[in-house]
Every structure is written in C-alpha cells, then in structure tokens.
Image (spheres, rainbow, N blue to C red):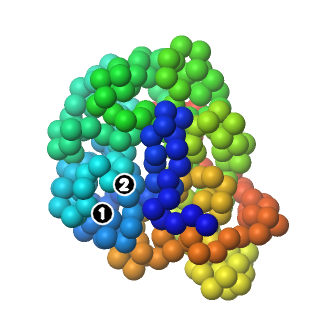
Amino acid sequence: MQTISSTVTLNNGVKMPVFGLGVFESGESTVPAVQCAIQNGYRLIDTAAFYLNEKEVGEAVRTCGVPREEIFVTTKVWNDMQRESRQREAFEKSLRELDMEYVDLYLVHWPIPGKIHETWKVLETLYEEKLVRAIGVSNFLEHHLEELSVKGNVAPAVNQFESHPYLNRKELRNYCLSQNIVPEAWSPLGRGAALEEPLLKELAEKYGKTPAQIILRYHVQNGVVPIPKSVREERIRQNAEVFDFALEGEELSRLEGLDRGDMHGDPDRVDW
C-alpha cells in the first residue's frame, strides 16, 4: 500500500510524490497552507506564475524545516509570456520569485496555438542547463501531445489536466500512461460539486471516509497524482488520509460512470 511519502518515477528517472497540494487562489493563506501541508507529510507543492504566489511558496519551503531537496516544487509558464515569446524571461522571473536555484518540474500551462514547439524548445534548454529537474505540460489533450512529439527531443514527464468525478478524462489518462507520461489532476474534487453525489456518500459510509477522500483515492488508484487545494489545516490533513484503504474494481467503474463532461477550461479554446 502506498503512503503520502510514496513516489512515482518519471520517464527521466526523477521521483515525484504521488500526492500534492495545489495553491491556486490561496492568497495570503499560501504560506501557512504550504507549511501545514509539509508538516503533514506532503512533499509536492504545485504553483504557477499565474497564481501570483510563487514568492509565498518559496518562503514556506525555505522556512518549513524540511530540506529543499526533499520538497518537489512545480511551477508553470503562463500564456501571455508564450504569445510574446518571453518564455525564458518567464522562467527566470519564477525562479526569482521562488528564490530557488532550480525548479523540480516546469510545465507549459496551456497549449497556445502556434507556440507549442517554441515554448517546448525553451523548456528543453532549461532542462539541459539543469535549471529544472523535469519538464512537462498542463492541459494538453492527446492531439497536443502528438503535435509536441513530432519535433520535441525530450518527452514530457507529466501532463497536468482537469480531472474529477464529473470529468474523469479516462481516455486522456490512459493515453498518458501508455506514453509513460504521468497524469496529474488539477481540481481533483471538481470544486466540491460532486461531494453530495449519492454514490460518493455511499462509499464514504462503507469505508468510514469522506466523499472527498473517496474521490482522491479514486485518482490515486488510477495512477493519477491529485493536487487538491485547501488552506484549512483540518482539510489539508484529511485530504491526505487516503492511503489506508482501497476501492474495489466495481466501485472504480461505478465512479467512472459519473462523468458528464463538466469542463472549466477547454484546451482547444485558450483565449486567456
């Protein structure tokens, strides 16, 4: 049975934790939230330039009492910097904000038409210069990944995309796994929309868990790295308590049946 300290080996040999904390819209609670997560065993922290809290994430990591090399920090290059061909500048700013010597995982935040190969080439250079330990993408669909593979010299190690009970992305998940790309789920709880779902309540009662824990366990068992966001100590601790039980195969199938295509951001229509 895995634990919160378990890792998955990326396609370049780097080990990434199987569970993490997202900090989108964590605001002034970012520092205590990250510190709380690390104190409760989290070792993966996911931020982005767009979140405007890289500085706070860096502060939390520096002051948490755990060596930097034990924390896996992810950040991302935003869309406007891709459109303006300022990808290298974007990374250097993120590194300054984080006040770190390197980033563990650097992602292309969204696939910008006409910029996929240009942006990826910059990320490959950062990887070659050892400023990042691994590179990957976010919100890429199968055809974006296929487009990237035509000219890319380094395969993406991770694809982070929206996935939750009402948008399970089973086909994309399985495609990534078949290509040795680790799937990672943002908004794994669907912004709480599914927590009142009868099936989740049924399984929560059976296992003595919360509906949120059932959802997160579903992700973990499917080989997906979930990064739920929370700024509440009790919820941060509770979210991680998903490694002491396992859902049955039939239950996983029933959960997959909840999918209804609820999407909060279409990767084929990025106009932000």
Q: Residues within 10 Å of mark 2 (few under 14, many from 20)?
A: many
Image location (x, y in percent) of residue 174: 70, 43
Mark 1 or mark 2, earlier in chain: 1
- Where the N terminus falls, by quadrant? bottom right
Is residue 121 at all visible to an observer of this figure?
yes
- Which residue is rendered at x = 50% and y = 53% of the image? 7
> Which numbered dot is residue 127?
none
- Which residue is rendered at x = 79% and y = 64% of the image? 249
Would you name the residue on which mark 2 appears?
A: 45
- Which residue is rendered at x = 62% and y = 59% of the image? 219
Q: Are marks 1 and 2 in contact (CB under 8 Å)?
A: yes
Is residue 139 at all visible to an observer of this figure?
no
- 117 w.r.t. 127: above or below: above
> Which numbered dot is residue 34?
1
Image location (x, y in percent) of residue 89: 24, 26
Left/right placement of residue 75 relative to residue 54 reads right
Left/right placement of residue 98 relative to residue 73 reads left
Q: Which residue, as the protein is rendered here, is positioned at the far top? A: 151
Amino acid on which disc 2 is placed = Ile
Amino acid on which disc 1 is placed = Val
- Which residue is rendered at x = 31% and y = 40% of the image? 103
- 27 w.r.t. 88: above or below: below
- 133 w.r.t. 186: above or below: above
Mark 1 element type: helix
Mark 2 element type: strand
